[in-house]
Structures are given as C-alpha cells and as structure tokens.
C-alpha cells in the first residue's frame, strides 16, 4: 500500500492536487474543490496534532474500519462521517490550499515514523506507519472525488 512517507508518492499527490481548479467537477459528495483540499489539509494538521478532535469511535468499529482502510479496498464514497474539526464549509483560496498542502504533507512525512502520533477521532491510536498509509488513501480518495 502506498504511503506518504515515500517521496515519489508525495510528488504524485502534489502533482494531482495542482491540477485542481475551481471548475473541477465533483463526482460525489457535497464539497467543492477548494473545500476538498482544505479538508485534506485539516486531516494533515490532525496527524500533526495541530487540530484535535475527540475520539468518537468504538473499539470494535475502529478495528473493522482499520482492516478495510489499510487494505486495497477503496474508501467507500459518501459513507464516512467527518470529524467536526475537519469539516470544510467555507470558501477557501485554492492556490493557498495547494501551497499549504505541500508544506503540511512534507511536515507529516518528515515526522519520525516511530514518534508518538495523536489519537485519530475515528480509528483510535494509530502508528506512524498507519498514518502514512491513511494520509495517502484519504488524499487519493478526495483527489479522485474531483477527477484528478
């Protein structure tokens, strides 16, 4: 499974994100492209511990969700609930969000994998390796949402 700890994967994600425009049509969901990118950036801030959201999952569901998430199975469209701190419901400057993504992605990816990572609001405690995979899969999911 791809991980954001791989420099070639980060480059791929940034190239795809840079193809987003305000006219990029969503294939599912309700977010616009600027909101989608802001949401991705908020997730990276969560991985860094800069945004917090209380754990609202339960151990059994989190275990099942981790099995699916860290497998080749795609994230289901329109099935997940977003943590309140990750909701993007305003208008954002797309160029600023692209620049922020490059900075945040690099900061997450250069954090030691064996460091102490924040508790995820849905999955619970994750390792750095799991955050690397989640970072790729979540970002890929939302970039596909806009056809990039």
Image: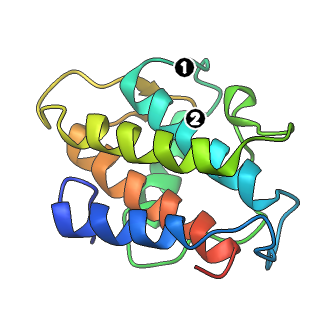
Q: At x 23% / y 43%, what residue is drawn?
A: 109
Residue that numbered label 2 is attached to: 42
Q: Which mark is residue 51?
A: 1
x and y percentages locating residue 114 in the rendered image = 11, 32
Disc 2, disc 1: CB below 8 Å? yes
Q: In this view, does 97 lie above or below 7?
A: above
Q: At x 29% / y 66%, what residue is drawn?
A: 11
Q: Is residue 123 visible?
A: no
Q: Under tag 1, what secondary structure?
A: loop
Q: Which of 124 and 13 is in front in this view?
A: 13
Quadrant location of the C terminus? Answer: bottom right
Residue extending farthest front: 95
- How many residues crowd around disc 1 within 10 Å: few (fewer than 14), some, or many (20 or more)? some
- How many residues crowd around disc 2 within 10 Å: few (fewer than 14), some, or many (20 or more)? many
Give me the C-alpha separation between circle 2 and circle 1. 7 Å
* The quarter of the displayed image where residue 77 is located: bottom right
x and y percentages locating residue 145 in the rendered image = 69, 73
Q: At x 49% / y 28%, what residue is drawn?
A: 46
Q: At x 59% / y 33%, what residue is drawn?
A: 58
Q: Nearer the viewer, residue 83 or 31?
A: 31
x and y percentages locating residue 59 in the rendered image = 51, 35
Dot 2 or dot 1: first in sequence order is 2
Quadrant location of the N terminus? Answer: bottom left
* The quarter of the displayed image where residue 26 is located: bottom right
* The quarter of the displayed image where residue 39 is located: top right
Left or right placement of residue 5 versus residue 54 in this view: left
């Amino acid at each position: 499974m791809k991980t954001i700890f791989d420099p070639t994967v980060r480059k791929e994600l940034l190239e795809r994100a840079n193809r987003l425009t305000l006219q990029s049509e969503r294939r599912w969901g309700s977010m616009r492209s600027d909101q989608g990118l802001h949401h991705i950036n908020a997730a990276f801030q969560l991985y860094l511990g800069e945004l917090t959201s209380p754990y609202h999952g339960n151990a059994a569901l989190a275990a099942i969700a981790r099995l699916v998430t860290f497998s080749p199975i795609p994230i289901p469209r329109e099935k997940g609930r977003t943590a309140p701190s990750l909701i993007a419901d305003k208008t954002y400057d797309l160029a600023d969000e692209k620049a922020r993504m490059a900075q945040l992605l690099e900061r997450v990816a250069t954090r030691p994998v064996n460091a102490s990572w924040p508790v995820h609001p849905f999955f619970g405690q994750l390792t750095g390796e799991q955050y690397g995979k989640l970072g790729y899969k979540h970002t890929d999911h939302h970039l596909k949402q806009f056809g990039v």
